[in-house]
Amino acid sequence: MKSRIDALVSQISEVIVGKEDAVRLAVACVLARGHLLIEDVPGVGKTMLSQALAAALGLKFRRLQFTSDLLPADILGNSIYEREEQRFVFHPGPLFSQVVLIDEVNRATPKTQSALLEAMEENHVTADGITHPLPTPFFVVATQNPQHQIGTFPLPESQLDRFLMRIEIGVPDRAAERAMLLGADRREMLRALPAVMNDAALTELQTRARQVHVAAALLDYLQDLLEASRRRHRTGLSPRAGLALLHAAQAWALMQAREMVLPEDVQAVGAAVMGHRLGQVLDSAENGRALAQSLLREVAVP
């Protein structure tokens, strides 16, 4: 089990050089059946990470470029009248794929952003009163520009909460950047990247992640973190955030070949899971991550 996960991380790291921590968090997010938000400046590999993840997993991939004039029907699909059948027929939009990259998600208007809520929470969309299931597995990777850039619309709290994790990639260190400069073209490497897994193997790993044992003491620790966040701010973390933290910690424990979740698993994923949720109430992603790291330092470990 661990060897398959390590092979997946290694395969993605051949394209995303010097960012194994970010790659491991992205893989943990997939194993926890969550969606991933990547916020960073242009040119650090946000799009490349999502493409490498889909390629290494052997999943169908679609890319959506969000712009201010995009409409919900452009991503969900339309019902079009078919003369031969004498009825309206639903034509699925590009959201109907296994891995969907939403590039610059905060460039679209709130109306279009909200069209993703049902899909990300329920794994289906509703059009004209009819529910249409999305493919399985279904995983959204969204990239976001820093909010100070011109032409961005901040994601509402309900939308941010649908993302299990928010990560940053950052620029590589000097050695990794030198290897990238001297190495092959990243896009050529991506096109030649073989899959090390398929959707059946991924589904098995996701099921195994949910089966990782969680002791009562670990649940006490997790609830202590939630309660501490609510003491620091009147809203703090929601129960859904607690579930997200639990599932991410189970996935991280599976990646370490452990049969039970330890406090260090919670700490490894804590900032990525809690930071953007706390950042929404503190009006700053940086402040949210800082508060998450503060909670992880201050709350006693069982």
Image: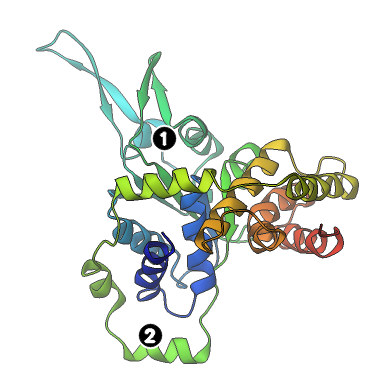
Q: Secondary structure at mark 1?
A: loop
Which tag, 1 or 2, sits closer to the chain's start?
A: 1
Report if residue 68 is visible in the image: no
- Answer with left or right where residue 183 lies relative to residue 70: left
- Answer with left or right where residue 243 lies relative to residue 79: right
Quadrant in the picture for residue 191: bottom left
* Quarter of the rendering occupied by the N terminus: bottom left
Q: CA distance from mark 1 to mark 2?
A: 38 Å
Q: Secondary structure at mark 2?
A: helix
Q: Which label was assigned to residue 290? A: none
The one nearer the camera, 298 or 117, is: 298
Residue at horizontal 65%, vertical 63%? 268
What amino acid is labelled 1 in the image? Leu
Please name the residue that numbered disc 1 is placed on: 71
Q: Work out whether 94 lies above or below 293.
A: above
Horizontal and vertical percent position of residue 102: 42, 50
Please name the residue that numbered disc 2 is placed on: 180
Q: Work out whether 64 lies above or below 57.
A: above
Q: Work out whether 73 lies above or below 95.
A: above
What amino acid is labelled 2 in the image? Met
Horizontal and vertical percent position of residue 27: 46, 59
The one nearer the camera, 260 or 75, is: 260
* Quarter of the rendering occupied by the C terminus: bottom right
Horizontal and vertical percent position of residue 301: 81, 60
- Answer with left or right where residue 45 lies relative to residue 106: left
